[in-house]
Amino acid sequence: MAKRGYLYHILLLTALGAYVFDVVQEGVELTKIAAAKKANLRKRQLMEERFLAVTKSTWPECVNLKMSAEACKDFIDNEIYTLFTNRDRYIRSVIIGKRRKTDQLYNAVTITMNDNDMVEGRDGDGMVYYDFTWDGSGELATAEQQSQLPPIAAMEPTASLSPLGIDPESVETIPPSDPYLPDESTPTDDVVAVAADDVVTTDDDVVLEEPLVVFDEVISEVTGSTVDEFMTAAPLTEEEGGGTTTAPIAGGVLTDGTAENTPEGDAKIEAALASLPPGGVTVEAAGERTIDPIDCAGLTGENCCLLIKLKIRDSDVNGNAIQCSLNYAASCTKKKYWQNLRGKKVHIFSNHNGIVSKVPKIVGRWPKKKVGVEFESWLLEGGSPPLILQ
């Protein structure tokens, strides 16, 4: 009986041991499976993050959630920092707010041009708008008030600073981001963020002259021409390069003055002059008034500014005359060059209430020929871009 009991206990212990072994082995297998699942999940997350960093170029969340511009900027900056890789980690976000009447350049009308310096207008129809009411003083703007132009941020390579009394050697410009300006591959505003290692160095790049000279800092306190000075300026001959030796009448971008109005555009200037009374000046009565949209189709940027100043001759209650700031349309080669010059960035547009008004997206590109330490040096030297052309 004792021997049978002993054998019974041996069999019981053996069975128990086998059971425990199976349980432990099953636990180990479950642990391995769980670890594998966790590793696969993390790998998938990393792949998704990598895919997001490579492909994400817009942030519709800012509009869908009605974020403030500041909250949207924080959100975008965090995603760029945590998700993007290599050079794209240096993409900057910039808030561009709506103009306000309290802004320093409230008295400047923005004139949007095409690459040929002809007025395109806000909606592509040549119409130009002043965004605020004009608080007229009832007094003719003085020569000094007329000639106080908005800052100049860039100029065409063939333009001259001499009529402004500025020594070109005293002005620092931003060098091109790389020695080539792509021809058909010039990027649009819908540039997709690419992996930073994707540095394209093809053999079919076309060497072209830079379409703009961009100043390291905007040129402020610019003294331009009065209406009368601009109208009586003697044109230069074709051998002399065209344009005039007279100072410009508008700020923003300094053009070379060689663009010409269409016959329809000339007719608009002639009609404006013909409508003037004897003495050549009409000054509105003092008080607040709305400036009607101005038809500048067929006019150069500077002649559009002349037309505006012919229609609004009075100073306002702050002692400022109406002014103009020339700009380029987003589709222009010159505008894209400006954006690319500073590398990739995200523009965040906000309305008057500080809420994001349209989906932020990446614009611009990185220089193709700069990598490693050279790229970092270029990035550090770039500084913060003036936003007149942005």
Image (cartoon, rainbow, N blue to C red):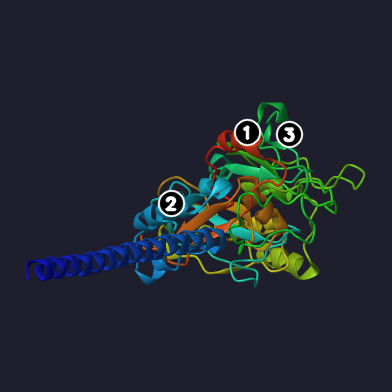
Viewer-nearest residue: 168 or 140: 168
Q: Which mark is residue 162?
A: 3
Image spot of residue 296 (x, y percent): 66, 66
Viewer-nearest residue: 143 or 351: 351
Q: Residues within 10 Å of mark 1 (few under 14, many from 20)?
A: few
Alpha carbon distance from label 3 to label 2 = 49 Å
Q: Is residue 109 left or right of residue 4?
A: right
Type of the residue with mark 1 = Val
- The residue at the point 26 percent across, 67 percent down is 18
- Name the residue tied to disc 2: 82
Image spot of residue 181 (x, y percent): 77, 50
Mark 2 touching mark 1, by CB under 8 A?
no
Determine if residue 138 is in view: no
Q: In terms of sequence position, does the residue under pointer 3 or pointer 1 come before the other?
A: 3
Q: Residues within 10 Å of mark 2 (few under 14, many from 20)?
A: few
Mark 3 touching mark 1, by CB under 8 A?
no
Mark 3 touching mark 2, by CB under 8 A?
no
Determine if residue 92 is in view: yes
Q: Quadrant of residue 357?
A: bottom left
Number of marks in the rendered image: 3
Element assignment for label 3: helix
Alpha carbon distance from label 3 to label 1 = 38 Å
Q: Which mark is residue 373?
A: 1
Image spot of residue 68 (x, y percent): 34, 60
Q: Is residue 42 left or right of residue 256?
A: left
Q: Quadrant of the N terminus?
A: bottom left
Alpha carbon distance from label 2 to label 1 = 22 Å
